[in-house]
Amino acid sequence: MIQSLEKHSIIVNLTAGGGKARSQWTDFLHQASAAGYRFDFHPTEYRGHARQIAHDLVHRGVERLLVFGGDGTLNEALNGMFEADRLLNPEVKLVFLSAGSSCDVIKMFPSPQSFLDRLTSVYYYQTDVGRIEFHDADGNPGVRYFIANSSIGIISRSIEAFNRPGPLMNALKRINVDLAALTAGARTIVRFGNFNAHLALGDQPGVLRRLKNITVFKSPYFGGGMHYGVPTRWDDGLLHVAAVAELHKWRTFQLIPTLYAGTVLQQPTAEYWQTHRLSVDVEDRTIPVECDGEIIGFPPCHYTLLPGAVKLVI
């Protein structure tokens, strides 16, 4: 059965996973071609390109937008589908063919389908979308949407190091994503200290905290095998928030096993909340904001939620 070109437009990022996606793409394309599928190919060429491609394709009227890449590629495509907090086409389905380093989005959902099944599956998850107001390097305001999580602090600094192009990090990603994440994290722990943050949770008055990190999440997973160990759902209508208070560098290293065990929130230095909105400002405006594995800008930030905003095929 030959499939419609327009209904199978696919955004492809072959550099995902430190380049590991290239071999996965070859295998997938062989299987899909043998099954009679045809595609309208749209390879990404630079950072942010998937966002522009997705925007153009949705305007053209595609019914299913396929994304082959990592969480960052999916995030770019997601953001290309929105305008002023609304989908350009409320009926379009976002189909994620996960081929990145950690693929934390996939871990949110039970029993993912095979890639081939996802191409035409009628089943989708009506998924909440997080919304962040932030600022770029020049102080101009911006808005970004996310599915998995967003961090400010040592995690965003570690992701900055993880994403930095280089032969060592690319090689580590191809060998083992946890090893790459640990290497980036260890380097960051040595160099990064703590920061003062002003937090305003929901309708509560703002408080000043000395922090190592704060994460706003829908998926408790990040950085490969690390996770916060709390149950969340793609459609629970909540933002989940984890904050880790200031720590000495050596104590930060000791915290790493609890991240892999999912017990970090049981530590006395950690706090966890559920909310519908959160404002975060920091004294050091050079600390980046991370969103679904990509560095997007800087604080101050304001987080809210768009319940059930996107139809996601996993």
Image: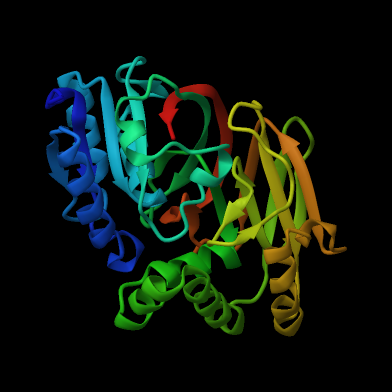
Identify the residue at image location x=23%, y=57%: 14
Residue 84 is left or right of residue 289, and the answer is left
Q: Quadrant of residue 295?
A: bottom left
The residue closer to the viewer here, 241 or 104, is 104
Residue 131 drawn above or below residue 187? above
Residue 243: image location, x then y, percent: 72, 55
Residue visible at 73% across and 63% down? 261
Q: Residue at x 41, y 30 (%)?
A: 313
Task: Report if residue 79 is visible in the image.
Answer: no
Q: Quadrant of residue 283?
A: bottom right
Q: Position of residue 176 (x, y in %)?
A: 46, 72
Q: Quadrant of the C terminus?
A: top left
| Residue 19 in the figure: left or right of residue 261 | left
Q: Residue at x 21, y 40 (%)?
A: 32
Q: Which residue is at the front of the view, 32 or 199?
A: 32
Is 254 situated above or below 97? below
Quadrant for residue 78, please give it. top left
Q: Is residue 28 above or below residue 181?
A: above
Quadrant in the picture for the N terminus:
top left
